[in-house]
Image: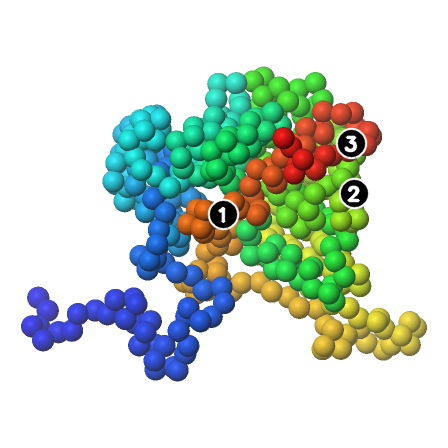
Amino acid sequence: MAPKDAKKPESAPMQEERRRTNLGLPDWRELPNTIEYRSESARRVRAGFVGCGGHSYRNIYSAFHFAPVDLIAVADVQIDRAQAYAREFGAERAYDDYREMLAKERLDCVFVVTNYDENGRPRFPGIAMDIMRAGAHAWIEKPPAANLEEVEAMQAVERQTGRFTQVGYKKMFVPTYMKAKEISQRPEFGGARQLSIRYPQRMPAPETRYALAQDPLAVGFLDHVWHPFAVIQYLMGDAASMSYVWDAKSRGFFAHFAFKNGGIGSLHSSGGQASGAPLEHVELVGDGSHLIVDNIVKLTYYRKFQGHYYGRSGDFFTPDESAPIVWEPEMSLGVLYNKNTFLLGYANEIRAFCDSVLTNTKPDQAGLRDTHMMMQIYEAFRQPAGATIDFKVPATVG
C-alpha cells in the first residue's frame, strides 16, 4: 500500500505542461503540424461506423484517437462483432443493420469499411447514397465503386442532398507526398512537369480484366490500383489522355499520361517484382529540380545547381546552399510522426474529413470529383493497348 502522503502520478497533460515551462517552450498549439488529441477537442463530429473488420480495426478506428470523433454507433452484419467493437472503441450502441442505425441515430457522418458483394463489386456506392439521403456525410474506403456510372450516381445524390462523400485515398495524405506537393508549387521548383511512379500491380488479361465475379485478379486490380492513381491525381491534377502497354507474362504494365497542366507522367505497374521489396518509388521533376520519394518515408529534394565544371571539377560536392535535402523519420521515440497511422496517411485523411464535416465544406481533395477522374483512368484499360484515350473534365458531369 502506498504511503498516505505519496503523490499521485502526473497525468500526461500535466507532465507536458511542466516540461514546457521548465524548458521555456511555446505552447504546442502555436507550432505547425501539431496534433490535438480527441479528448482535447472542443467540437467533435457525431459519427457512425459501418463495418467491423480487420482493416478498420488496425487503421481506422484506432486513428480516431487523433481526430475530433465521438463514435456514437457501429453496425456490422455480425452483431457480436459490432458489440465487441462498440465496447473496445467506446461507441454507445451496436446494430446488425446499418439502415436501422441511420434511422435511429442523429449522426453528422458515417465511416464505411466493408467488403465486396457476392459479385465482387464494392458495397460502398449504395451505402454512401443511403447515408447522404439520411442527412449525414459519408467517408468510404477505396475502391469507391465498380464503374463510372456508380460514381455519377453518388455525385447526383450529393447534389440532391447537400451532403458529400470523401474516399479513403490515404496516399493523398501521406506526409512525404504532401511535402513533395508543397515543394513542387514553389516558384523555384518550376512546377510539376514530369511524374514517374513504380507500384507493383498485376492487371488481368483483357477478357477478364473487369470480370469481378469470375476473376479474383480483377478484384485485386480494382482494389489496389487506386493507390498509384491517387498519387497521380494529387501531384499532377487531371489527366488529359493516356495510353498503355501490357506484359502478358508478368501482367505488369506501363501507362503514359499527358496532363491538363501540360506535364507528362508514367505509371510502371511492376507486376512480378520481388514481394519483399518496398512497394513505391515516386519521382517528380520540375525545371532544374526534382524530388524522390522512396518507400513513402524517405523524401529527397534535389535543388537547382548549375552543375560542375565538366572535365575540370575535382570533387562531386554541390555547394551547401544547393545541396540535396533528405528527410526521413527517426524510429526510436514513441511519438506521432513515426506511427503508421501518420506515416501512411490515415490520421491526416480522417482529420481532413472531420474538418470538412464540422465546417460543412465539401472536401477539395479525395472527394467524388477526384474519384470521377480516377475512375476514367481505371476504365481506360478497357481500350486496346497502344490506343490513346482522352478524358473528360469531371467538373462538367451533370
Does the rendering let one see residue 271? no
Please give the name of the residue rendered at 31% of the width and 77% of the height, measured from the top-left corner.
18
Going by the numbered disc 1, the residue's amino acid type is Thr
| Residue corresponding to mark 2 | 258
* Chain-order first, disc 1 or disc 2: 2
Q: Is residue 55 above or below residue 336?
A: above
Say which quadrant the N terminus sits in: bottom left
Q: Circle 3: is it few (<14), some (14-19), or many (20+) Cα within 10 Å?
A: some
| Residue contact at pointers 1 and 2, CB within 8 angstroms | no
Q: What amino acid is found at the position of numbered circle 3 in the picture? A: Ile
Q: Is residue 293 left or right of residue 128?
A: right
List x then y, in percent, for residue 92. Answer: 25, 40
Residues at marks 3 and 1, CA–CA distance in whole angstroms = 33 Å
Q: Secondary structure at mark 3?
A: strand
User: 109 or 64: nearer the eye?
Assistant: 109
> Mark 1 highlights which residue?
361
> Is residue 247 or residue 254 the one in the foreground?
254
299 over 14 or under it: above or below: above
Select label 3 or label 1 by which is in front. Answer: 1
Where is residue 123 drawn, in percent x and y?
Answer: 48, 26
Q: Which residue is mark 3?
A: 389
- Secondary structure under the numbered disc 2 in the rendered image: strand
Instruction: Decide if residue 188 is on the left or right side of residue 350.
Output: right
Answer with the quarter of the image where residue 175 lies: bottom right
* Label 1 environment density (alpha carbons within 10 Å; few <14, some 14–19, many ≥20): few
In the rendered structure, find residue 114 and report the number of the disc placed on it.
Answer: none
